Image (tube, grey):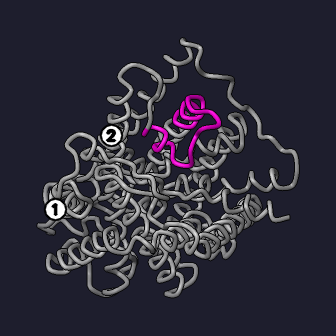
Amino acid sequence: MTIGSIAPLNGSQTRKNKGVVDETAPLLPYKQDEDNSELDGFNGASFSGAVFNLSTTIVGAGIMALPATMKVMGLIPGILMIVFMAFLTESSIEMLLRFSRAGKTVSYGGVMGDAFGKVGRVLLQVCVVINNIGVLVVYMIIIGDVISGTSSSGVHHSGIMEGWFGVHWWNGRAFVLLVTTLVIFAPLACFKRIDSLSFTSALSVALAVIFVIITAGITIVKLINGSIGSPKLFPDVSGFASFWNLFTVVPILVTAYICHYNVHTIDNELEDSTQIQSIVRASLGLCSTVYITTSFFGFLLFGESTLDDVLANFDSNLGIPYSSILNDAVRVSYAVHLMLVFPIIFYALRLNLDNLLFPSGGPLALNNCRFASITVVLISLIYMGANFIPSIWDAFQFTGATAAVCIGFIFPAAITLKDPHGIATKRDKILSIFMIVLAVISNAIAIYSDANSIFKKARYLHVPELCVLRPRRVYINEFMEMF
């Protein structure tokens, strides 16, 4: 990995000698001087806390879509692609940090502004706002589906509380999400430092690990019983349609490691900024391990029956003792996991929206009125979106996918190709071109599948499914079958 080559500007940098270099940068959550009473007593984020915060940014709801990529690509190419995307993500983050050091900027927006001026900075902020709002609305919809249940194509999927207590007004979607918003989301959204969320981030990662352990345990039991067949190791490529089908998993893999909008925020709160190099490596290593084990055991357990959201596979009898208890444990851990991911994604959303609306308003953490107003408005909009505008599911999926690849690959690659400080190598520029091509392919697939789903709404019920990524390849397969 290349990120270890990043050198600090002047040896080891501590939080005390980090100054505000770019006052228009969107992410300014760190202490500016010793007299800021709002941040008194904070001596810098810990290494472990930073790792958990960055890992939580990475591991969201998309983890449940990864086993389905193994069904398309086969175990060996699928796992190799997960590892490859981790290395590619690290390279894009390395580029951001290297140009950040060269330009003495302290945020992603600052790097974009350094390379492309105000237009670049605003474009980055708009993409973060679009991506994060879409993601958070989807998260809230999924939480409602898991707890309260949902119906799709005439089939009703019981929620956890509905299965336990029956149908009541107090376990309906609107009321459950309102309580979740007031009791969990609102308090966690009030923290002004991202390091304050390190404990909930650690718990979120632990819940993802619990899911992996449960899935692995069920798989091992069924292997011992001889009820699991041999998995597909390589893809079945028998024609152009099946070959094209391999590309339909690209959007899932490309967006699996998107965390770039929080890297500088975490870096700014570190006591020693040189630790960001090890933090990125540790986070990507941890998330890669979770992704690989989830994909491996999820696909091994369900085989060709693996659904686009593997969580839906835990809605039926698993064929082992205590199946219903294990199903509920998986769904509960998943719902709580998303609840704890919510504030990490919300943190970057609030900071970037604040700078779009108040570019010269000073640090958001020091203005309680502005902080509270933006927090209340954003949480209210997300709540209403999850409850009253379910038809925008496809639109948010489209904007989220396209904005995410811009944040993760197109913008870092564009900065490198622009090379405002003359530090990019030939390898950097070749890699940047590859990133842009990969992102364009991902966007093209996302645009086609989502546009197709919009035109099909007249033929199908468009109630949101229990998955964060709709089955893009289904639409493409139908298109190819026309020929």
The C terminus lies in quadrant: bottom right
Q: Is residue 310 left or right of residue 30?
A: right
- Image spot of residue 304 (x, y percent): 65, 37
Amino acid, disc 2: Ser
Which contiguous range is marked in magenta? 293-315
Look at the numbered disc 1 and give the secondary structure of its residue. Answer: helix
Q: Within 10 angstroms of label 2, few (less than 14), some, or many (20 or more) residues?
A: some
Q: Quadrant of residue 190?
A: bottom left
What residue is shown with label 1? 182
> Which residue is more in the foreground, 235 or 209?
235
- Position above or below: 246 against 212: below
Residue at (49% x, 46% y) in the render: 63
Q: Count how many numbered circles sit on residues in the image.
A: 2
Q: CA distance from mark 2 to mark 1?
A: 20 Å
- Position above or below: 87 against 33: above
What residue is shown with label 2? 333
Residue 311 within the segment the image draws in magenta? yes
Residue at (23% x, 53% y) in the render: 196
Residue at the right extreme, as displayed: 239
- Image spot of residue 302 (x, y percent): 57, 33
Residue at (52% x, 23% y) in the render: 219
> Which residue is more in the foreground, 30 or 331?
331
